[in-house]
Image (cartoon, rainbow, N blue to C red):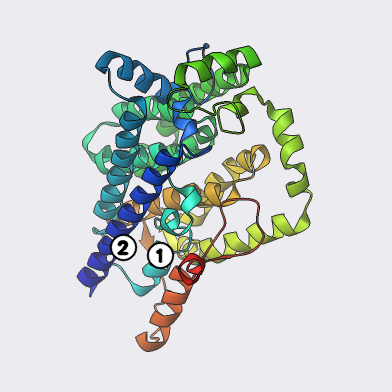
């Protein structure tokens, strides 16, 4: 039965990749203000947050004399393909129980980008693809080289999207859990360069987080061929915002009690089963739940800076379950869960309704999104 479950998940991953790829291509064709324009931000007006990958492809486009938008589109599609393949390779190594299907097929899991179209093509895919790749190769490299590689990856992801720096904690957690045999003191020494690197990057980004209207004009001029309406309500425009603008812009949402309550309930709904099995899984002498809570608390600043709560939960969830199932496959995590003998004829319909009927909106709404509303319309 485990093989059938693995094949079923593999089939869903393939379908998700196809649907997500279609979404990304559509956004690129439409020159979408958020999913597309963010990838074009570059350093033509000097260093600025979010511009690392955009600058690399801007230079490649000039060197190769090839269209910038097509280069970035191919890159984004490769990132999604890499992530879904890596996800499958990690999941297939475990003995999947029925309760694991509720975790792997949570509404906020890998197929989130298929049901919530607006989540497709966002820059967090660069973090998820590199994080999943690191999980697959961590066994092949020494702890010291792991540290060097983590510093490289987290620097790239943080300079590509400043918000991703708060997810560096998942690399810290993975390194710590996998190398616990080294002892806490040695692990702490290894982590010091990682923490120092993250702090330096954060300070550097913070000091260069905004640009003037003149610098915005320079960036827009460099990409005007690929983004004709540059600077008019897209992600490039947000480079002129500071933290104060973010707070002012989203204050009405944060002060809306329903908004906070809704996403808290959504968090419990989507993370509940995973939190349950984490609480019943031991990593040496403590519950794995402790690691998960620590990681989630570390990402809380993101929820104060922005309002895309569904998006933030999506990245946290995938990072968490990838760590959990990798450690479980390596017998680093031991779990004791009472697998109640419930008839499949009862539990499978519940799973289908739970996983495929609704999802969490990316941002700014306080109602669950019915997945098939467009099909019905």
Indicate the quadrant where residue 249 lies: top right
At 44% from the left edge and 69% from the top edge, which residue is drawn? 356
Most foreground residue, 95 or 101: 101
At 70% from the left edge and 34% from the top edge, which residue is drawn? 246
Coordinates of residue 237 in the picture (x, y in percent): 60, 27
At 48% from the left edge and 15% from the top edge, which residue is drawn? 43
Secondary structure beneath dot 1 equals loop
Secondary structure beneath dot 2 equals helix
Q: Do the residues labelled 2 and 1 touch (CB within 8 Å)?
A: yes
Indicate the quadrant where residue 235 lies: top right
Task: Name the residue beneath numbered marker 1.
Answer: 105
Quadrant holding the N terminus:
bottom left
Who comes first in sequence, dot 2 or dot 1? Answer: 2
Task: Name the residue beneath numbered marker 2.
Answer: 12
Looking at the image, residue 298 sits to the left or right of residue 180; the answer is right
Most foreground residue, 284 or 79: 79
Most foreground residue, 325 or 365: 365
Looking at the image, residue 307 sits to the left or right of residue 11; the answer is right
Looking at the image, residue 33 sits to the left or right of residue 55; the answer is right
Coordinates of residue 285 in the picture (x, y in percent): 45, 54
Where is 256 relative to 155, above or below? Answer: below
Please say whether residue 181 is visible from this viewpoint: no
Q: Residue 332 carries which label?
A: none
Q: Label 1 crowding class (10 Å Cα cut-off): few <14, some 14-19, many 20+?
A: many
Coordinates of residue 349 in the picture (x, y in percent): 42, 82
């Amino acid at each position: 039965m485990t093989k059938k479950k693995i094949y079923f998940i593999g089939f869903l991953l393939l379908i998700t990749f196809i649907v997500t790829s279609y979404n990304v291509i559509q956004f690129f064709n439409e020159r979408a203000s958020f999913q597309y324009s963010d990838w074009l931000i570059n350093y033509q007006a000097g260093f600025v947050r979010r511009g690392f990958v955009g600058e690399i492809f801007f230079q490649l486009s000039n060197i190769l004399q090839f269209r910038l938008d097509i280069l970035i589109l191919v890159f984004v599609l490769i990132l999604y393909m890499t992530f879904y393949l890596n996800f499958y390779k990690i999941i297939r190594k475990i003995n999947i129980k029925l309760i694991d299907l509720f975790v792997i097929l949570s509404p906020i899991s890998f197929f989130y980008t298929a049901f919530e179209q607006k989540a497709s093509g966002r820059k967090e895919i660069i973090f998820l693809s590199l994080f999943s790749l690191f999980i697959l190769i961590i066994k092949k490299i020494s702890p010291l080289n792991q540290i060097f590689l983590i510093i490289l990856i987290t620097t790239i992801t943080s300079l590509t999207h400043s918000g991703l720096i708060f997810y560096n904690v998942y690399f810290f957690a993975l390194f710590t859990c996998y190398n616990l045999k080294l002892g806490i003191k040695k692990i702490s020494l290894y982590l010091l360069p990682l923490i120092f690197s993250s702090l330096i990057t954060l300070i550097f980004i913070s000091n260069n987080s905004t640009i003037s209207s003149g610098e915005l004009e320079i960036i827009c001029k460099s990409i005007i061929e690929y983004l004709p309406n540059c600077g008019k309500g897209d992600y490039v425009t947000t480079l002129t915002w500071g933290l104060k603008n973010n707070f002012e812009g989203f204050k009405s949402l944060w002060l809306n009690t329903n908004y906070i309550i809704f996403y808290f309930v959504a968090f419990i709904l989507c993370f509940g089963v995973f939190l349950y099995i984490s609480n019943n899984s031991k990593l040496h002498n403590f519950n794995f739940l402790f690691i998960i809570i620590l990681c989630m608390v570390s990402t809380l600043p993101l929820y104060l800076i922005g309002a895309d709560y569904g998006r933030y939960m999506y990245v946290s969830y995938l990072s968490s379950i990838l760590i959990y199932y990798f450690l479980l496959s390596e017998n680093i995590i031991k779990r004791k869960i009472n697998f109640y003998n419930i008839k499949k004829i009862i539990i499978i319909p519940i799973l289908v309704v739970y996983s495929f009927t609704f999802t969490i909106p990316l941002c700014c709404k306080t109602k669950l999104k019915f997945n098939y509303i467009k099909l019905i319309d």
